[in-house]
Image (cartoon, rainbow, N blue to C red):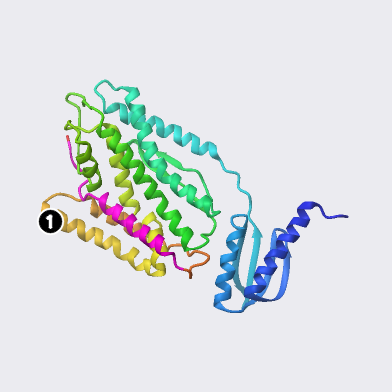
């Protein structure tokens, strides 16, 4: 019986694995598996093992690599990743539901429940939130990481949604990849927020007579855009409100906590020391919120965010495959810039009053 092209290709791939493994390990036994290979090894040196991890990047996301210890032996398993069929119909259904929920909210901002205006608001909020998640998506794909398209979450809030999320599958190659995936969402998202805010502030808006209103606390970035455009109305257009929401989301996501975007960025910048920042940050938010409330006699969202951040901080950050090589200076500067953006998107009292 002659092996087919697929069997031959698999043998070639196993040969590549063996060649890479022998650079970092002494192989004293190996076992072929139905979906890969198992090596019994002894590491040659720490530096060689780190180089091995770096070379594994070329095989992601098509193969999974695990290092285990069995009966005192170091066992290295390389297995073909199972192809999971993406159920994109879920993404589509959630997106459609979110369009409906955000359109309803947008229409309710108008005197005559104008559906067309509601659709405009829906497109603005989905553009802002979707841009953030697509930033993550494109960066992850660039590094060969398996990730899903955004899942939008429809919900009856003051914006009609709880935002959007994407799911990453498999390991993170290195700290550069971790940084790029973490920082790309907030950077792309804040650019979208600036654009939508600028458009919204140029549009006239007349709220419904006798209707309810929300008095917003605006962050420095929003105020800077407003000072350039100089809107001539007291009430901002719902599209500008969508930009304000984007800035709020950017600030929260850039908190250097757990697996939030800021947690990814900080972990990539300072390594395992980021764990201390992650544990300390919720305390800073809660104490800061309490001091603000005491001095101003107004409730601050910082206390709530501190509690949420505390929950996120309980989950340890996954370690990249290659955690030894630090990120370059350009990324360090970008990371500092990202945290400056977070400060510019911050307001201790986002919602001043409801009327």
Question: Which residue is identified by label 1?
Answer: 294
Front in this rendered view, residue 247 or 329: 329
Q: Quadrant of residue 38?
A: bottom right
Vertically, is 169 above or below 354? below
**Residue at (22% x, 40% y) in the render:** 228
Compared to 152, does 186 lie above or below? below
Name which quarter of the figure residue 193 lies in. Answer: top left
- Image quarter of residue 229: top left
- Assign the N terminus to one quadrant of the image: bottom right
- Left or right relative to 323: residue 155: left
**Residue at 33 percent of width and 47 percent of height:** 249
- Residue 82: x percent and y percent? 63, 52
Q: Residue at x 16, y 32 (%)?
A: 234
Work out which quarter of the rendered image holds the C terminus and state it. Answer: top left
Q: Is residue 308 within the magenta segment?
A: no
Residue at 18% over, 57% down = 290
Give x and y (percent) for residue 256: 34, 59
Is residue 231 shown to the viewer in this render? yes
Indicate the secondary structure of the residue bearing disc 1. helix
Residue 158 seen in this snapshot: no
Label 1 packing within 10 angstroms: few (<14), some (14-19), many (20+): few
Could you tell me residue 145's position as x and y percent?
A: 54, 54
Residue 299 in percent (x, y) is at 17, 50
Task: Looking at this view, name the residue that lies furthest to the top.
Answer: 112
Q: Which residues are magenta?
A: 326-354
């Amino acid at each position: 019986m002659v092996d087919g092209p697929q069997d031959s290709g698999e043998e070639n791939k196993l040969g590549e694995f063996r060649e890479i493994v022998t650079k970092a390990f002494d192989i004293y036994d190996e076992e072929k598996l139905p979906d890969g290979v198992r090596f019994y090894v002894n590491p040659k040196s720490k530096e060689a093992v780190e180089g091995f991890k770096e070379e594994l990047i070329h095989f992601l996301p098509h193969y999974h690599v695990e290092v285990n210890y069995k009966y005192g032996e170091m066992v290295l398993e390389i297995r073909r990743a199972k192809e999971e069929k993406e159920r994109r119909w879920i993404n589509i259904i959630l997106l459609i539901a979110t369009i409906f929920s955000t359109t309803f909210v947008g229409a309710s901002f108008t005197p005559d429940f104008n559906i067309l205006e509601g659709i405009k608001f829906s497109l603005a909020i989905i553009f802002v939130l979707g841009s953030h998640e697509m930033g993550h998506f494109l960066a992850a794909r660039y590094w060969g990481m398996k990730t899903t398209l955004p899942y939008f979450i429809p919900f009856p809030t003051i914006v009609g949604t709880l935002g959007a999320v994407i799911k990453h599958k498999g390991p993170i190659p290195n700290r550069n990849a971790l940084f790029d995936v973490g920082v790309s969402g907030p950077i792309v998202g804040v650019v979208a927020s600036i654009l939508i805010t600028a458009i919204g502030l140029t549009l006239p808006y007349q709220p419904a007579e006798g209707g309810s209103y929300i008095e917003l606390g605006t962050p420095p970035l929003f105020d800077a855009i407003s000072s350039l455009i100089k809107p001539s109305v007291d009430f901002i257009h719902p599209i500008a409100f969508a930009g304000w929401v984007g800035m709020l989301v950017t600030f929260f996501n850039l908190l250097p906590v757990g697996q939030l975007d800021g947690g990814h960025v900080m972990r990539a910048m300072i390594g395992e020391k980021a764990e201390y920042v992650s544990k300390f940050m919720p305390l800073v938010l809660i104490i800061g919120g309490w001091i603000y409330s005491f001095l101003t006699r107004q409730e601050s969202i910082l206390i709530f965010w501190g509690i949420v951040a505390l929950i996120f901080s309980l989950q340890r950050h996954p370690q990249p495959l290659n955690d030894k090589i630090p990120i370059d200076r350009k990324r360090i500067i970008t990371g500092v810039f990202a945290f400056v953006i977070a400060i510019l998107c911050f307001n201790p009292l986002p919602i001043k009053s409801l009327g």
